[in-house]
Amino acid sequence: MQPVRSPRQSKIIDVVVIGDGIAGCLAALAARKRGANVVIIEKSQANVPHGNTAFCGGALRRVSTEYSAERYFADIMKVSQGEADDELTRITIRNSRRAKANLSRLGIRWTLPTSNPGRADSVVGKGARLAPTLRQAVRKAQIAILYRTAAKDICFSNGSLRGVTLRSRTATHTMPCKAVVIATGGFQADRKLVTQHIGASAHRLVLRGYKNSTGDGHRMAAKLGARLIGMDGYHGGMIHYGYKKYPVVGQERGMRSVKKYEPGILVNRLGKRFVDEGEDTADKTYAKFGRMIALTQPGGIAYLILDSSWKDHVNPMYEGPEKGPVEAKSIGELARKLNIAPAKLLATVDRFNTAARDGTHAQMTPPKTNFAYPIEQPPFYAYAVTGGMTFTFGGIQINSKAEVVGTTGASIPGLYAAGEVTGGFFYHNYPAGSSLTRCAVFGEIAGRNAAAFARKNANLNTKKRSTQAAQKT
Ligand SMILES: Cc1cc2nc3c(=O)[nH]c(=O)nc-3n(C[C@H](O)[C@H](O)[C@H](O)COP(=O)(O)OP(=O)(O)OC[C@H]3O[C@@H](n4cnc5c(N)ncnc54)[C@H](O)[C@@H]3O)c2cc1C
């Protein structure tokens, strides 16, 4: 391995990695392991939690004795409705066990969530532990991270990569390099990109993760002719409405998705039901319902109405500021407390109760296919909910080597991407725990190939220089 040089000493960096989330850190470590001189550029402050990696739940889906590669593949294809890239998915799954083992070697410890033993391991301490552990490993490998420094442009001339333009608090300059790995995360925090690609009201979704995931990598790559794919997809979920009023609290402590609402009914501000709450179990519907509430219901808010027989069942799911519930002795009183016209809410609850009692709940409009229990035991409760945005699915198209693919279909030499900034993995929904896996797997692949590209380029340049020298003599 070559000795580590600080970015100031070296003229040309082998591999510049943009972003110090899980994808960026693992790319940097893989490139360093192959002898490359690596620098990470990170726009955030070192001592402030940053990147979605720091906010995540830490579930990592991997193949195990109880969870076969075939089932993993089938799960991704099912939720993506067959749109996920076949090759990238297979590579992710094939390397999922190794990705976990690599993380363990870096000091990550794991716990198994009992509800889902076959499918995902969870990082002890979640993202709040994962992110600092990765950065510690990076520092141990003597890789410099330049904090509070944003990559603004990736520069090419005559078809060759020249460097990355950086802006720090004091200066703007170009860092010359041979290869670049873009690992800048999603664009969920960028209002312009979100409304352009996801929908006019998409900014109403409450950001569950990092507030500066602004699609910088998407923009830099697109400027260079990279192909962006699947840009309208994202992962969201139903969340407690209090986070809309106090998003900072949620971003600091993490926002839990609400996945227990089946026994109640969801009504909007007009006191009307708008969805089949019992279409399936909540883990299969919470993303869809969250989106529907935020994007289509008045004020982007809904209330889960239930009676005292179910309160203890759902209550532990609700946390955060003003988590509720609102309690009342009658439905009329509950409506008044929620600022809903009492007659409207009473009519909705009466209609639902009649259908639940006489077994016609699956035929009503909207139906309640399953879990239809009359709301009749006072006191009555209401939990306010809305939709949250976890991360965007769309991004830079890459191939199996993590090379950035251009709009012509050819890869862009020297340019690699990994993690949430890449597209092609998830559409419509994603199986929980598989984003960290693809970030880890493709971070490693990107770093390894970027280092190989830099080495090959160095050899070519050396050869070119000796040929030129020979020609001169
Ligand atoms: C609440 C929540 C829970 C989640 N739970 C899970 C889970 O349990 N399992 C799972 O698989 N996934 C989960 N995810 C998703 C997962 O966390 C992310 O997909 C993953 O961490 C993304 O990693 P990344 O390295 O691609 O990007 P990030 O971790 O977002 O890192 C990108 C970094 O790039 C930096 N950056 C951006 N632009 C620039 C620039 N111009 N110059 C320099 N630096 C820049 C950013 O500051 C950031 O630090 C969750 C997400 C959230 C929000």
Image (cartoon, rainbow, N blue to C red):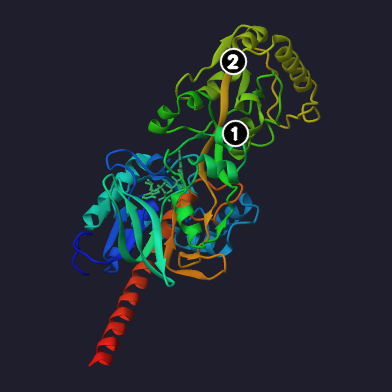
Q: CA distance from mark 2 to mark 1?
A: 20 Å
Q: Compared to 370, does 455 lie above or below?
A: below
Which residue lies under the disc numbered 1?
Answer: 290
* Residue drawn 28% across the image and 47% down it: 147
Q: Which mark is residue 381?
A: 2
Say which quadrant the N terminus sits in: bottom left
Q: Position of residue 327 (x, y in %)?
A: 56, 11
From the viewer's perspective, is 359 left or right of 162? right
Q: Position of residue 35 (x, y in %)?
A: 26, 69
Amino acid type at mark 2:
Tyr
From the viewer's perspective, is 258 left or right of 350? left
Mark 2: C-beta under 8 Å from nearest atom of ligand 1: no
Residue 367 visible, this orientation: yes
**Tag 1 secondary structure:** helix
* Residue drawn 41% across the image and 54% down it: 183
**Tag 2 secondary structure:** strand
Amino acid type at mark 1:
Gly
**Residue 358 lies in what quarter of the image?**
top right
Residue 259 visible, this orientation: no
Q: Nearer the viewer, residue 80 or 120?
A: 80
